[in-house]
Image: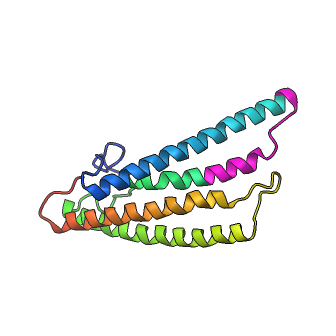
Amino acid sequence: MTSDTPGDGQPAPTDPVGAVLHTLSALLAVFGGLLLAAGALMTVVSVTGRYLFSAPISGDIELVELGAGAAIAAFLPYCQARGGHVIVDFFTGGMRATARARLDGLNALVFAACAGLVAWRMALGGIDTYLGNDQTMVLGVPTWPSYAVMVPAFGLLCLVCLHGAAVGLLRGASPLPAAR
């Protein structure tokens, strides 16, 4: 990667749609962070209880699994909105900015299709786990709430990717320099 690759220093979008998507992505990422923090705290309490008092939290691993899956999905839209995904620009580093913007827009379009497909299939899987009353082994906790977080996260990721595709393709079509 080169130093002109966008990342955490990329400014937030200024257009209304991009600003709303960025805000929703940030809020979802904060929620994901809270899920991970709760899982980490539960793990610390469980391990401490296991070694000091021989009393771990029953079912802690399955709760952390459910929370971590939802948290990871919650981080994806924000990572995409901030340009935080890994970009290998070995072949594109020497391209003109407009050509790179078009290629980035095309990449975002393909990513949007993948995210939309995952959201759709995950929604069907979530409905299936709800109707089938799927539960964890130890605690008997329903697994569908994890899907209830992941489906909107992948839906938002799809929207963020579509917005990025539109911006990239429009920027590539205009004589203005790309924001790289």
Overall secondary structure of the magenta stretch?
A: helix
48 lies above or below 94: above
42 lies above or below 155: above
x%, y% of residue 173? Answer: 18, 69
Near-viewer residue (162 or 103): 162
x%, y% of residue 97? Answer: 20, 59
Near-viewer residue (78 or 129): 129
Horizontal side of 54 relative to 73 (left or right) equals right
x%, y% of residue 178? Answer: 20, 57
Query: What's drawn in magenta, residue-wise?
Result: 52-69
Horizontal side of 43 relative to 9 (left or right) equals right
Residue at 27%, 55% (x, y): give it: 16
x%, y% of residue 36? Answer: 60, 43
Residue at 74%, 47% (x, y): give it: 61
Horizontal side of 82 relative to 29 (left or right) equals left
Residue at 57%, 50% (x, y): give it: 71
